[in-house]
Amino acid sequence: MTTIHYVESNTSHAGNFVVDVPVGYHWLLVLTKTPAQFWVDGELKTYPAHCAVIYRPNQKVYYRSSADQFVNDWIRFETNEPYITESPLPTGVPFALIDPEYCGKLFELLVIEHNNQRDYKHSSLDCLLRTLFNKLLESYFHGGELTPQYHNLLRLRTAIQNHPGDDWSVSKMAEYLQISTGYLQNIYKKTFGVSCMDDVINHRIRIAKEYLIHNTQSIAEISSRCGYQNVEHFSRQFKQITGHTPRNFQKLNSALS
């Protein structure tokens, strides 16, 4: 069971902000959105934005702003849940978040659930907190070095996944990140293991399959909706990836349903 005492999202403080609790208190999780200094291994160390740090009960807590402003998400709670108490995550030592926007959204939902009295409040809070700790584990065991452009690339990829039918091109994506097309293609593939345009195509075909199975629109309409200028181009790429023409794919899945 977990009891949340307080949770805040996107909280802003002045540049002189300091938290100093020599003997700690409850469990505390802090996600930074700006650079900050933390007391680690007997000295004050500076960490960049988008870090997470967990403090156990009765563990010394000291962190402060290292810029003109300090912005963070934080939650103070008590728990006996093994996924937290026995977690391999370090305590008192910040580590980089690989998906800070996702974690930030989870914090926003935690705030909403905590501040409202709803029938499934405790169950919802538990699910959100478990998901948050899964994301912390993913970050800690990520293994790769986060490039300066990593979080911008992640935002770009999320936009592609959410809107694959938009008019994407390498030049537009590079402009979105304000970098050269060559640099974009290089770091995108290094980061995600797929080229930026192949990623666009894969997500277009993924959503096209859904439309073909569960939608009454014509293939021409689906083609346009998925970002293709003509049906021939759509059909060619669809068959290249799935092994079927859109029409045959539709007929095959209609027979199976």
Image (spheres, helix red, strand yellow):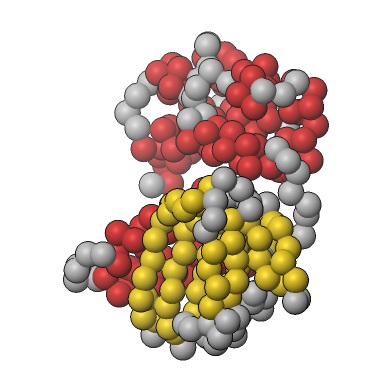
Residue at image location 43% in from the left, 46% down from the top = 256
Question: In screen coordinates, is 182 left or right of 134?
Answer: right
Residue 107 visible? The answer is yes
Q: Position of residue 29 (x, y in %)?
A: 52, 69
Residue 99 visible? The answer is no
Residue at image location 75% in from the left, 21% down from the top = 180
Work out whether residue 228 or residue 21 is closer to the camera in this orientation and state it. Answer: 21
Whether residue 211 is situated above or below residue 143 in the rendered picture: above
Q: How many numbered marks are there?
A: 0
Q: Position of residue 109 (x, y in %)?
A: 36, 57
Work out whether residue 253 or residue 89 is closer to the camera in this orientation and state it. Answer: 89
Residue at image location 74% in from the left, 20% down from the top = 181
Q: Quadrant of the N terminus?
A: bottom left
Image quadrant in which you'd find residue 68: top right
Farthest residue to the front: give it. 16
Residue at image location 55% in from the left, 73% down from the top = 20
Image quadrant in which you'd find residue 235: top right
Work out whether residue 196 or residue 2 is closer to the camera in this orientation and state it. Answer: 2
Question: In screen coordinates, is 215 left or right of 74?
Answer: left
Whether residue 233 is situated above or below residue 36 in the rendered picture: above
Q: Position of residue 115 (x, y in %)?
A: 26, 64
Whether residue 69 is situated above or below residue 159 in the rendered picture: below
